[in-house]
Amino acid sequence: MKRAFIPLLILGALAVVSAWLALSFGSVNTPWQTVWQVISGNERGLPFDLVLQLRLPRAINAFTTGALLALAGALMQVLLRNPLADPYVLGISGGAAVAALCALLLGIGGLWLNAAAFAGALISMLIVFGLARGAGAWSASRLLLTGVIVASGWGAVIGFLLTVSPDAQLRGMLFWLMGDLGSATQYGVGVVTLVLGLGLSLPLARNLNVMARGELTARALGVPVARLRLGLYVLASLLTAVAVMTAGSIGFIGLVAPHVLRLAVGNDHRILLPGAALFGGSLLLLADTVARTALAPQQLPVGVVTALLGVPVFLYLLSRAERR
């Protein structure tokens, strides 16, 4: 088991390096010595404001959002028994996007915008679960099909809202849809949700290992499959809802991070769950750093960067799976 912690140590080091890069680079680069002086409390003035008041909250939000998406993706892949499932596959982001766009149309921003996105995600979660369950039990395939249909419906509503929106508000709406960490200043909810998500999911790791081998095997070994599936769905949905509330729709992190780790360290969820959180947070931190620096002082939506990086990685993983 000690050897199993080596990947976690490597991923922890990656997270530290990613955070250091996020605090050092931007439209104005800050030497690493100055960053250290600011963190240790020996530097004030402009570097202090730049690093601790502007970059640090954004870096925390980027890391927690990426970690939430990756953790939710790992849980969704077990729930749907599909290694290519991601947190958005059940239409949760679509419900959040519709609610957030309605709030923007009404001129609502700040915490109320986040609250609207979170409420929309929860409403979408309840709709999908209610329709998938119907009058009886629900299966992974029925849940997936229902989620895809609901996501398509939300997509149509989003297209309608963008069509009738005034030009003055259209840019902000598009930025939110493509993923934007620029307006995220409060990070307490994301940090608390991530800690709770790991605290609730890690005790389930052994059952998840059995669940991944099939429901019949899990039932034979005494795993409460129905209760576990419901818990996974609710937990993954809440993690996704908080991530979307914080930064909008950011693709590929929840798909690529847990899938790459499965290929690298195997399917032991005692390592996979915390590893996915570390890896997903690091990936989004690096992507946000690129988004802030590639065309500085102009900033790109971080969702665009994750898509540009995620598409070739996803195609490579898919081709590798076909060769196998």
Image: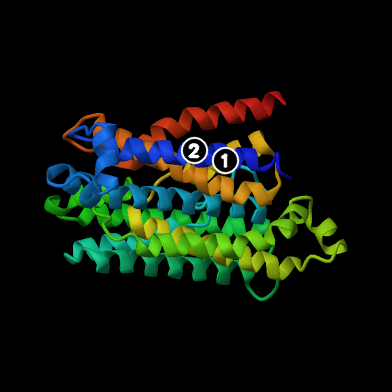
Q: Is residue 224 visible?
A: yes
Q: Is residue 300 visible?
A: no
Amino acid type at image mark 1:
Leu
- Left or right for 77, reference 166: right
Q: Residue at x 79, y 53 (%)?
A: 214
Q: Callout 2: helix, strand or loop?
A: helix
What's the CA distance linking mark 2 and mark 1? Answer: 6 Å
**Few, some or many C-alpha atoms within 10 Å of disc 1 (few <14, some 14-19, many ≥20)?**
few
Residue 126, horizontal then vertical, whole percent: 51, 71
Residue 1, horizontal then vertical, whole percent: 74, 45
Q: Nearer the viewer, residue 170 or 36?
A: 36
Judging by the rendered image, the residue that carries numbered circle 1 is 9
Query: Residue 246, labelled with which disc?
Result: none
33 versus 156 height, above or below: above
- Left or right for 189, reference 151: left
Q: Callout 1: helix, strand or loop?
A: helix
Judging by the rendered image, the residue that carries numbered circle 2 is 13
Residue most extreme to the front: 42
Residue 249, horizontal then vertical, whole percent: 38, 50
Decide: marks 2, 1 in contact (CB < 8 A)? yes
Residue 108, horizontal then vertical, whole percent: 20, 66
Instruction: Find residue 153 and report its image quarter.
Output: bottom left
Q: Nearer the viewer, residue 120 or 32?
A: 32
- Left or right for 296, reference 309: left
Q: Residue at x 67, y 38 (%)?
A: 265
Amino acid type at image mark 2:
Ala
